[in-house]
Each structure stands twice: as C-alpha cells, then as structure tokens.
Image (tube, rainbow, N blue to C red):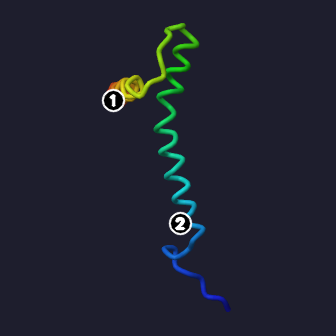
C-alpha cells in the first residue's frame, strides 16, 4: 500500500495555494482599474489610468465598503 504524504509536502496543494494567492493579488491590482474604466465609459469622465488614480480608487472603494458594512 502506498503511503500518502502529509499536506505540507503535497506539491499539488502547494501550487494550488500559490495560484489562489496570485489570483487574489491580481484581482486587488486590476479591480480599481476596471472601476475607473467603467466610470469613464458610463459618464465620459476622461479619467487617466495612473497608479495615483488607482490609489484614489482603492481609498474610495475602502470608504464605501466601510460605510456599507456599518449601516447593516
């Protein structure tokens, strides 16, 4: 009978964990740009895609999330 390795030594589990972390980081980086793109398309605001505007959008999204979660 073949003995199975513990979870900490299973390479498939390690690669899955790394993949989930990388997808999460990618979403954190891209979602503010997607929101800026959507606002530009909807309201024709001509907001530039810069890292400073990305940071502003992260702050706005954090403030909105905080105000929505406290109102419940």
Image height of 60 relative to 15, above or below:
above
> What residue is drawn where x is 57% and y is 71%?
11
Residue at image point 47% right, 45% down: 25
Residue under the image location 52 percent in, 60 percent down? 17
Which corner quadrant holds the C terminus? top left
**For residue 30, above or below residue 9:** above
**Residue 63 picture quarter:** top left
The mark found on residue 14 in the picture is: 2
Is residue 64 visible in the rendered image? The answer is no
Q: Residues within 10 Å of mark 2 (few under 14, many from 20)?
A: few
Q: Position of residue 42 (x, y in %)?
A: 57, 11
Q: Residues within 10 Å of mark 1 (few under 14, many from 20)?
A: few
Determine whether the residue tagged by mark 2 lies in a helix, strand or loop.
helix
Q: Mark number for residue 66?
A: 1
- Give the mark toward the camera: 1 or 2: 2
Residue 68 to residue 46: above or below: below
Along the viewing direction, whichever of 60 and 37 lies nearer the viewer: 37
48 lies left or right of 66 = right
Out of 18 and 52, give the one closest to the viewer.
52
- Depth check, front residue: 7 or 29: 29
**x and y percentages locating residue 16 in the rendered image:** 57, 60
Q: Earlier in the sequence, mark 1 or mark 2?
A: 2
Residue 3 visible in the displayed image:
yes
Task: Point out which mark residue 46 bears.
Answer: none
Q: Position of residue 55 (x, y in %)?
A: 37, 28
């Amino acid at each position: 009978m073949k003995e199975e390795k513990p979870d900490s030594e299973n390479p498939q589990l390690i690669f899955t964990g790394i993949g989930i972390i990388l997808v999460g980081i990618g979403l954190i980086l891209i979602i503010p740009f997607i929101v800026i793109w959507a606002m530009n398309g909807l309201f024709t605001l001509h907001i530039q895609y810069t890292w400073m505007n990305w940071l502003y959008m992260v702050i706005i999204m954090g403030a909105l999330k905080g105000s929505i979660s406290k109102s419940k």
